[in-house]
């Protein structure tokens, strides 16, 4: 891993254990992703979205209101909108530059983007029936708050355990399970992995 990738892994490990410490790391991580925004899509490999696609295949019904957290340049948001033509998709990211790139690359009126902190989201309780996170630090309390009952949370890592921002599936299951999620599915596709959970 590069220095930046190792930094992201350390932050992930700390914040998952102690979410309140996110306030220490928010600014440097935002700066890192602002800097990467212009070249972010050139870093994507052919199978980067494979675990997201595999998890979307497992949904029993099409989602209507989707939040893509850590949307970056909007690749997952656009994928979801293409897969589900009736869905309204919101993309949120802490990086202003990533959001600007996402808006530039998106021509669908069904996708909107905004700068937002995943630890304190600007959405009402139960606003979404699907939340996707691709290579993103999960803030479990907020995920549980903004997904509706019977809604899904999809957490995907494009390179599995080699992804710089990564939380092992057993930790995802434990944290989500404590917040009322069940019916977990663990999937592998391409180099990556994903966990799909349903809120009871």
Image (cartoon, rainbow, N blue to C red):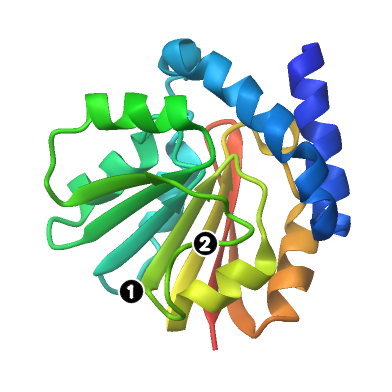
**CA–CA distance in space, label 2 to label 1:** 27 Å
What residue does disc 1 label?
60
68 to the left or right of 111: right
Q: Residues within 10 Å of mark 1 (few under 14, many from 20)?
A: few
> Relative to 188, is 161 above or below?
above
What residue does disc 2 label?
121
Q: Position of residue 199 (x, y in %)?
A: 54, 81
| Mark 1 element type | loop
Nearest the camera: 7 or 80?
7
Nearest the camera: 198 or 185?
198
Q: Position of residue 195 (x, y in %)?
A: 59, 58
Q: Residue at x 58, y 24 (%)?
A: 33
Q: Residue at x 54, y 40 (%)?
A: 94
Q: Earlier in the sequence, mark 2 or mark 1?
A: 1
Q: Position of residue 76 (x, y in %)?
A: 38, 41
Q: Residues within 10 Å of mark 2 (few under 14, many from 20)?
A: some
Q: Position of residue 81 (x, y in %)?
A: 22, 49
| Mark 2 element type | loop
Work out whether residue 162 can be spotted. yes
């Amino acid at each position: 891993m590069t220095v930046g990738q190792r930094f992201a892994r350390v932050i992930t490990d700390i914040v998952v254990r102690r979410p309140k410490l996110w306030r220490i790391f928010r600014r440097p991580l935002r700066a890192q992703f602002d800097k990467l925004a212009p070249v972010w899509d050139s870093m994507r490999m052919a199978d980067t979205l494979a675990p997201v696609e595999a998890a979307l295949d497992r949904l029993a019904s099409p989602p209507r209101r989707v939040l893509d957290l850590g949307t970056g340049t909007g690749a997952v948001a656009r994928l979801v909108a293409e897969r589900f033509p009736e869905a309204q998709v919101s993309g949120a990211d802490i990086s202003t530059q990533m959001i600007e790139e996402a808006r530039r690359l998106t021509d669908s009126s069904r996708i909107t983007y905004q700068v937002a902190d995943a630890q304190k989201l600007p959405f009402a309780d139960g606003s979404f029936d699907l939340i996707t996170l691709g290579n993103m630090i999960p803030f479990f309390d907020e995920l549980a708050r903004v997904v509706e009952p019977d809604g899904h949370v999809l957490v995907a890592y494009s390179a599995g355990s080699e992804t710089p921002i990564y939380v092992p599936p057993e930790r995802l299951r434990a944290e989500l399970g404590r917040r009322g999620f069940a019916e977990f599915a663990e999937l592998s596709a391409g180099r990556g992995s994903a966990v799909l959970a349903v809120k009871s």
